[in-house]
Image (cartoon, rainbow, N blue to C red):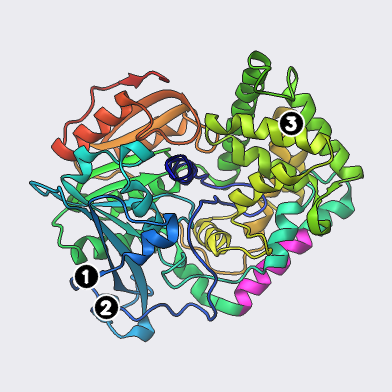
Amino acid sequence: MTRTLARRWRVLAGCVAATLLLSGCTLPVFAPRTEGGAAGPAPSGPVGGTADWRPCPEVPRELVGRAAPDMRYDCATVAVPRDWLAPGATASPNNRDTFGIALIRARSAKQRDRIGSLLVNPGGPGGSGVDTAVYLSFGSAFGGIPADVTDRFDIVGFDPRGVARSSPVECVSDENLDASFGYDPDPDTQAGFDGLVALNQRIGEACADRYGDELRLFSTEQAARDMDAIRAAVGDEKLTYLGYSYGTLLGATYAQLFPRNVRALVLDGAVDPKQDSVADSESQAKGFELAFTNFTRWCAQNAARCPIGPDARAAVTEALAKADVSPVRGRGGRTATGGWILYAVIASLYAESDWEKLAKAIDQLRGGDPTGVFERADSYAEREPDGTYSNLFDANLTVNCADDEGTPDLAGIRDLQSQWRTRYPLFGPPLALGLLTCRYWPAQRDPYPTGPATGAPPILVVGTTGDPATPYEQTPKLAEMLGVGTVLTWDGEGHTAYPQTRCITEAVDAYLVDLTVPPAGLRCPAR
């Protein structure tokens, strides 16, 4: 149980801001598909009202089989306007004009001198903050939040609008998700490129048919405004927040909209909001190439643990080439195409602890067994053994494209595919092709603001030098944009830093509890 829970949280914290064919990240969240459209659960109170908490011990039982020791779990649903910018939005409590935002509160029986609530978001977009709060509540022994914090704060998680329990967006079929994840990551023929274009067109049309103009309502700015309603509903005068990966963008947007409502924000795995979609994709291509190179060096130095050494890059490249010609078949006839292999690699680069699993999966594939590849890729994609998916990628696609200000035309995307193949051989082409997704998004866009958080207190921006998903160079850029950001650096591997080491944990805890800002330029060692 200990290892399983720690593993699930490490992957949860390792969420990518915008990945390949369907921009986004996957987390080990509990978000079963439901029938119906955007209508959510009946709100438990009016907009801006107090959260009506009820015990919900079933949530941690569903996720990990039990509650954390000395923790009580309560749930609520807060009503928010579908469109915060519509006239009279804040005075619209009836269910037809609102979304229901699901919350969970984990409160320690040992709590003393309570400061307030710590609102958490794992990133994505599309990750479940409800699930995140449960994982974090199990404490530092499981890779969660230390007692120094849980003794002073309620841990409050929320599923943002469109995610899991909060009016979930569901418009990408399981068949289209399979096709997207399994597609050739670098189609060199015109026919292969055209097939990917057609797939993205089908996905966009299906979402437009189901939601129409409502798709724009799932933007980051709308979700950030929901956060202020949550702050008021839990009774906090000011917001204390921990956001990972895309959650840093959500937190930065909140700080710009409500700077005087900020108590403390920890933004870990920073996203640079000023990057356009092309720069963002290229940054990730560069980041994943660096992380993969670090993996191959580890393989060369750890032959006993890396059966595809000494040249792991050659082994993975060969596996992808063979998949183009004769993909290995697994149980039920499922084939390990190049797309599934690449996603197995991507899933394993978020944490150094997964490198050995990747090496073994590729070695098994060479022997004709794709089981390990599918396990790695399916954990990333949230694909169940029966071929069904959670709504994470539906939400991820919807939020990313609602935020997107525009993408290159087809000729430009095709050109980037070629250019990035030279610069970033493994990850460049698929990240260039990922731009097709929002190119064919039929809905109105709602870009988030990109400016200073004038009037906010110091905000802690945390970056990891070996981060593949949100490369480290984005960390100082986010801090600079906010104007009140202080950078904390971890010289480590993987995506996100807190609470990975004592140095990082002590600095973040002191900031959250005592509002002590770390010294400028503080760098924490890898171990």
Disc 2/disc 3 C-alpha distance (Å): 51 Å
Viewer-proximal residue, 482 or 381? 381
Q: Where's residue 367, x and y in %?
A: 83, 35
- In the rendered structure, find residue 392 and report the number of the disc placed on it: none
Q: Is label 1 in contact with label 3 (beta carbons under 8 Å)?
A: no
Residue at 44%, 29% in the rendered image: 464
Placement of the C terminus among the 4 image quadrants: top left
Viewer-proximal residue, 448 or 218? 218
Left or right of 148? Residue 406 is: right
Q: Is residue 55 magenta?
A: no
Q: Is the residue 30 above or below the residue 514 in the image? A: below
Q: Where's residue 269, x and y in %?
A: 43, 38
Q: Where's residue 475, x and y in %?
A: 41, 33
- In the rendered structure, find residue 425 and report the number of the disc placed on it: 3
Residue numbers of the magenta segment? 197-209
Q: Amino acid at mark 2?
A: Ser
| Quarter of image, res 343 | top right
Q: Which tag, 2 or 3, sits closer to the chain's start?
A: 2
Kindly identify which residue carries mark 1.
51
Residue at 63%, 60% in the rendered image: 384
Q: Is label 1 in contact with label 2 (beta carbons under 8 Å)?
A: yes
SS label for mark 3 = loop
Q: Which tag, 1 or 3, sits closer to the chain's start?
A: 1
Q: Amino acid at mark 1?
A: Ala
Q: Where's residue 284, x and y in %?
A: 58, 37
Disc 1/disc 3 C-alpha distance (Å): 50 Å
Q: Main secondary structure of the magenta part?
A: helix
Left or right of 229? Residue 501 is: right
Kindly identify which residue carries mark 2.
44
Placement of the N terminus among the 4 image quadrants: top left
Please tell me how crowded label 3 is: few (under 14), some (14-19), or many (20+) other residues with Cα within 10 Å.
some
SS label for mark 1 = loop
